[in-house]
Image (cartoon, rainbow, N blue to C red):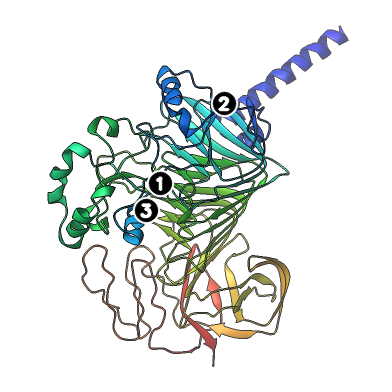
Amino acid sequence: MKKKVVLIVCIILLLALGVVGYLNVKNGKEESSSTSASNNLAADVTINLSDLTSLKTYTLEEYDTFLTDYNAKTLPSVYVTKFLFDGAGVYKTYDLDDFIEEGNDVEVKTYDGKVINITNAGNYEFTGELTGGMIAVNANDVKGNINIILNGVKLDTDSKKVPAIDVYNKDITSTDAKVTIIAKKDTKNYIEGGKLKKVSLIEKNELSTYTSKYSGDNKTNYNAYTNYYGVYTSEEVNKVLFAKITADSEDLQDGDPYYFYKAAGAISSDIDLYFEGEGYLEVTSKNKEGIETKGSLTFAGGTGDYVISSQDDCLNTTTKSSSGTNVHNTLTIDVNSLYAIVSLEADEGDAIDSNGELIINGGTVVAIAKPGQDAGIDSESGIYINGGTVLATGDMYEEVKSSSKQNFMVLSFGSSTSENDIVSLTDESSNAVFSYKTDRAYSNLVYSSNKLVNGTYNLFKNGTITGNNNYGFYTNATLTDGVQLGYRSNSIQGMDGGMPESFNGERTEMPSMSEGERPQMPSGDRPNMQGNMPNNMGGNTTATNKDFVINGISNLFSGVATYSE
């Protein structure tokens, strides 16, 4: 009898645990389910980048054979080509820059690196090293998960012409295929590449119909660079596997075509792209952006360590929303750490830029923009900081929404910081909350963390810092000495689209301007875009408020300078 009772109790307990587990999963309470799954994926195919001899390979001389196999749909799920296939023909590497630099008589060349092509759903694990190659994922007509598992990979295109990883699809709104790049636990992975150059999609037999679309210098250049246009026939245009882009007239430069396809970074995707895993991934851009998508970009799971360096935006969801279209362009970050740093040699670049919403949910996120007119974190539809530790610097400040779930502060300096300057925030017990040593000038700094609770803080410049230093950001820091800084205004007007007050208490009037034009401010003032605080009001170098009081989610301090009573 006792055994029966024990058995019944055990069954009841098991059923109860099963129900609780089911409810937890159903209610989203199962922790790191996606990450744990991604770390335990069994590879369907393992590719050693150091030795690709086991994969079927097509050279340029075998292009006709390749085309026959492609049309017959007899290609394996992974194969190698010595050219990049766009669906219509062998990809041509030249773009308008080639003509401008070398004249109009440019020999048409093909990309001759090793292209590892993936064409089906599945788990693809990569190991080893490859210089002079790339991974191309054809997501057209694919339904299911395509998981790119990086297990100690070094991949370098050895070219500024193509991304190291490119995911392409005709339809940027497609969600049939979910592509995830996974840095495997306890591995270090390095990806380095350039961008996919623009290719004209103006049909050979319809060139004359496009003449009216150009004017001025664009029309002159359009007529001059005839070799750049008419690459495809009308039939071939419909076969192109990459997402086609229509340029706005204001975006045209040097006679760019209205219709083209492109990638713009070391890792590029025409559709939504996901990153997971507990490993380390370093992405270096040789040309333009670090990681860019025409869909949404998601770093998920709360794990993984990422370092992104670029010649333009480090992270970018490029597609803008327009009325009546379903465009995915949200950028979501939940990591262990992510350092996004625009190269000082770049012409421009926001560190993290979303043409939709930017949502930071967890992890240490450091975002350093190029000095000039760029922001550490930038978004068309709103920035939300809900968790983690965030530090972002740049010369522009883009609005962080007051509906964020975690306190944040914005420091707008009266004059730009200089290379090697250290800025430290201390709490009421003189403990360093954060310290950051810059390698460049910047005017605005955004900081958020769960350490930033309501209370009074002090700010210092330079001094002696000890602690763990990652790309200038110190954790567990100890500060000694330092010059105390203050501020002149803590108005948060302008945070939600309103205009900030100038320091004499009057409203700073925004001049009228056409779209894309920067406003002209009175002499001595910096440009003030929506949500951006002026940085040099009157050129004052001292401030009289030394207590930085945090009170609620949004806290903005402008005119930060040396404190003086």
Which residue, given by chain and number where applicable, does mark 2 sit on? 56
Q: Position of residue 64 (x, y in %)?
A: 42, 25
Q: Nearer the viewer, mark 2 or mark 3?
A: 2
Q: Position of residue 139 (x, y in %)?
A: 45, 31
Q: Position of residue 409 (x, y in %)?
A: 51, 68
User: Are the residues tagged 2 and 1 within 8 Å (C-beta)?
Assistant: no
Q: Is residue 350 visible?
A: yes
Callout 3, which amino acid? Answer: Ser
Residue positioned 17% across, 43% down in the render: 207
Q: Earlier in the sequence, mark 2 or mark 3?
A: 2
Say what secondary structure mark 3 lies in: loop
Residue positioned 41% across, 83% down in the render: 536
| CA distance separating discs 2 and 3 | 45 Å
Say what secondary structure mark 2 lies in: loop
Callout 2, which amino acid? Answer: Lys
479 relative position to 393: left or right = right
Q: Is residue 142 visible?
A: no
468 relative position to 339: left or right = right
Q: Is residue 256 above or below residue 424?
A: above
Assess disc 2: are there few (<14), some (14-19) or many (≥20) residues with their C-alpha within 10 Å of its C-alpha. few
Callout 1, which amino acid? Answer: Thr
Which residue, given by chain and number where applicable, does mark 1 sit on? 93
Q: Nearer the viewer, mark 1 or mark 3?
A: 1
Which residue is the extreme one toward the top?
Answer: 1
Which residue, given by chain and number where applicable, does mark 3 sit on? 381
Q: Position of residue 501 (x, y in %)?
A: 35, 77
